[in-house]
Image (spheres, rainbow, N blue to C red):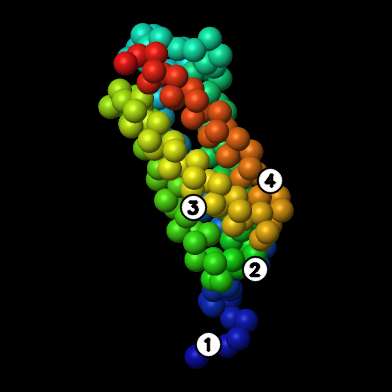
Amino acid sequence: MEVEGDAQSPKPPSPKQRQGHALAFFVGVCALAAFYASLYAPSGAGNWGWYPRLTKPAWAPSPAFTGPVSTLFYLVLAVSIWRIWRTGAFRTVPFTLAGFAGLLFLQSIWSTLLYGLQSPALGFADLMIIALLAAILWLTYHPIDKLAGRLWLAYLCWVVFLLPLNAALFYLNR
């Protein structure tokens, strides 16, 4: 016979613990996406692969810069979606989670398309969809949580920077 408060009975996690678990979950999911994306990304230190041989615009940052910045933005995405989750918006605005999942998938395959398949055209097409989806999500997230909206806007600016860079890679190497 179980008695309330019995040491054998598992206690449900506190709200603070649930928030910590959710943050860890979102960071983990984004880390997995970042890891997958890194499989095809050029090494910041090496001269291997197709990318180093491409003609690049003068303003193209080095992989040693873009790799860490991209990794940082995966963390930004995790914190942003966690903040949206904390508001309960997943229940009232289902697009918040579905849009995030779709964007994370598209973001993680961008490296496969650009570097793995060696296709600036496919990379650019993917980035166009990412930019559109990121803008829609920013418009969705900003009213729900201002900090999440600001974090998302920083990510959107990064994507908007990558668009002309990817287009230039296509134009200069056709």
Q: Amino acid at mark 1?
A: Glu
Tell which of 144 and 124 is nearer to you.
Answer: 124
- Eye-nearest disc, 1 or 4: 4
Image spot of residue 37 (x, y percent) = 40, 33
Q: Amino acid at mark 3?
A: Phe
User: Which quadrant of the rendered structure holds the C terminus?
Assistant: top left
Residue identifier under label 3: 100
Q: Earlier in the sequence, mark 3 or mark 1?
A: 1
- Mark 4–mark 3 distance (CA, rounded to whole Å): 15 Å
**The label number, if any, that marks residue 137 in the structure image:** none
- Eye-nearest disc, 3 or 1: 3
**The label number, if any, that marks residue 150 in the structure image:** 4
Q: Quadrant of residue 4?
A: bottom right
Residue identifier under label 1: 2
At x 66% / y 50%, what residue is drawn?
149
Secondary element at tag 2 = loop
Q: Amino acid at mark 2?
A: Ser
- Mark 2–mark 4 distance (CA, rounded to whole Å): 28 Å
In this orientation, does residue 27 appear?
Answer: no
Q: Is the C-beta separation of discs 3 and 2 under 8 Å?
A: no
Secondary element at tag 1 = loop
**The label number, if any, that marks residue 14 in the structure image:** 2
